[in-house]
Amino acid sequence: MEIDPPKFQKLNCQNNTKNEKKDHKRSKISTHSGSSINYEFLPNTIFMHNIPYHANYYDIESLMKPYIKIKELILFLDRFNRFKGSAKIILRKEEEYEKILNYSGKLSIFNRLIFLNKFRIKKNNTSQKKINNNENFKRNQFESSNQHEEKNIKDIKNKEWFEKNFLNKNNDKKNDNKNTKKKQNREFSTNQIVIFNLPNNILKETLLKVLKIIILKTL
């Protein structure tokens, strides 16, 4: 069913003392179509909801100017392409580093998101050890460049493994108990969310370049 183009809304929780005190309190945002989405507002959270469906990368660039210094960025995609859809951008806590990196690797393998820039993620020894011990992450992680991007995607041979162990696993969770369902709500769906992470040393120009690439490359 076709939906109306989303309206642009912006919420800056940095200046909202109530949201800062609530910390992990979930808040509800109502869209112009009458539906509502629950999001967990964290202290110092910048939330941009429903970028206009006709927005191109120049619009994204102008929207990002006030927030260009943020070190972590998650891009939520909802059927976004050059013709229709919406995107949501939210700043998250550093504790989600591993989950973000792990999931973004899986997405990029199946051409959901193409990393054209190489990112060097600096973490402490403990966190780095956890990442190195994560077989799924090591199996799915790769760095692609403009020259090797197509070759890397063609060389991937674990698509069946991914579908069997990840996609089906997510579908089975729907029939699980309440605790599992709550956990599932915090996980990411393959067809609506794309994630990438930025360390402190990424410059403004690089961030904007990556945003442009993501908007143009997503399904």
Image: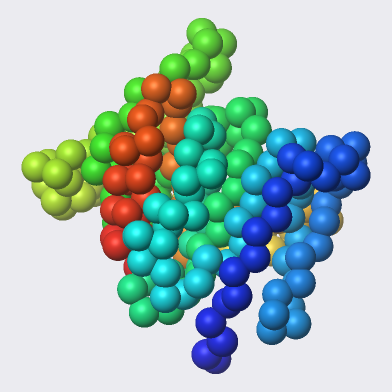
Q: How many marks?
A: 0
The answer to whether residue 84 is above or below residue 196 is below
- Residue 65, percent from left and from top: 47, 46
Instruction: Say which of 98 and 15 sits in front.
Output: 15
Q: State how the image is colored.
A: rainbow
Q: Residue at x 69, y 42 (%)?
A: 45
> Of residues 45 and 80, which is closer to you in this image?
45
Q: Report which quarter residue 216 is drawn in.
A: bottom left
Residue 206 at x, y percent in the picture: 31, 37
* Quarter the C terminus occupies: bottom left
Report if residue 166 is visible in the image: no
Residue occupying the far top of the picture: 125
Question: Image check: 57 left or right of 90?
Answer: left
Q: Is residue 147 left or right of residue 141?
A: left
Q: Residue at position x 55%, y 91% from top?
A: 1
Is any part of residue 33 visible from this angle? yes
Q: Is residue 44 left or right of residue 75?
A: right
Tell me residue 200's x, y (percent): 46, 23
Q: Quadrant of residue 199?
A: top left
Q: Residue at x 30, y 46 (%)?
A: 209
Q: Position of residue 193 (x, y in %)?
A: 51, 57
* In front of the other: 186 or 86: 86
Q: Residue at x 29, y 60 (%)?
A: 217
Q: Is residue 5 above or below residue 25?
A: below
